[in-house]
């Protein structure tokens, strides 16, 4: 089933897909930000900053949309009746309306916006693994087990040394 986009679905100009120097990043059309938000909210309700983090994690750091692209798009989606905000602990948490669920990208047709790109490149693979490592390290850091924390620090120190050793090789 092909879904038609509203008149706000595509922008004439491309938007920057991430922050920083932009090397190795792809440019993101306004429609892709829109589709990404709808797809994320199809999984569960989220606030804007959470969406930015989720997209960064799901793309291995390849796509980190700015607040300047997420929040205006959320406002458009709200104006179109596709999302609805709810105040939760001082934050606006957005969820899909019934119309929003209909407009969300079909996961079986062409994949999700963050799944398109250079997934087979060594750069993408390395970044994906770095984000997975950071996620695991964050989980260990939340633990109260001093022995685990000591071992985790040793593992991370060793990994850092090995990476710098790799850079030092000719």
Image (cartoon, rainbow, N blue to C red):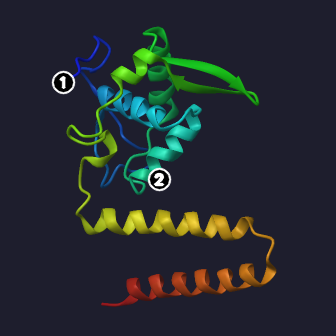
Nearest the viewer among 22 and 55 is 55
Residue 74 locus on image (x, y percent): 49, 22
Against 110, residue 122 (above or below) is below
Against 97, residue 128 (above or below) is below
For the residue labelled by badge 1, is the local secondary structure a helix, a strand or a loop? loop
Residue 98 locus on image (x, y percent): 45, 17
Label placed on residue 2: 1
Residue drawn at x 42%, y 20% is: 100
Q: Quadrant of residue 102?
A: top left
Nearest the viewer among 67 and 4 is 4
Say which residue label 2 marks.
57
Residue 90 locus on image (x, y percent): 75, 27
Disc 1: CA contacts within 10 A as few (<14), some (14-19) or many (>=20): few
Quarter of the N terminus within the rendering: top left
**Mark in the foreground, 1 or 2:** 1
For the residue labelled by badge 2, is the local secondary structure a helix, a strand or a loop? helix
Residue 161 locus on image (x, y percent): 53, 86
Direction from residue 127 to residue 122 in the image, left or right: left
Number of marks: 2
Residue drawn at x 73%, y 64% is: 142
Against 63, residue 2 (above or below) is above
């Amino acid at each position: 089933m092909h879904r038609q986009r509203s008149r706000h679905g595509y922008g004439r100009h491309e938007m920057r897909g991430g922050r920083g120097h932009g090397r190795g990043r792809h440019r993101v059309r306004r429609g892709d930000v829109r589709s990404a938000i709808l797809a994320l909210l199809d999984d569960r309700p989220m606030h804007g900053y959470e969406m930015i983090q989720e997209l960064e994690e799901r793309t291995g750091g390849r796509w980190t949309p700015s607040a300047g692209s997420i929040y205006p798009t959320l406002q458009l989606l709200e104006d179109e009746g596709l999302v609805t905000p709810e105040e939760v602990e001082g934050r606006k948490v957005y969820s899909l309306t019934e119309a929003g669920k209909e407009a969300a990208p079909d996961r079986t047709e062409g994949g999700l916006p963050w799944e398109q790109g250079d997934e087979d490149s060594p750069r993408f693979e390395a970044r994906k693994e770095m984000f997975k490592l950071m996620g695991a390290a964050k989980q260990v850091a939340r633990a109260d087990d001093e022995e685990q924390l000591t071992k985790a620090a040793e593992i991370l120190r060793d990994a850092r040394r090995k990476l710098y050793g790799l850079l030092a090789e000719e």
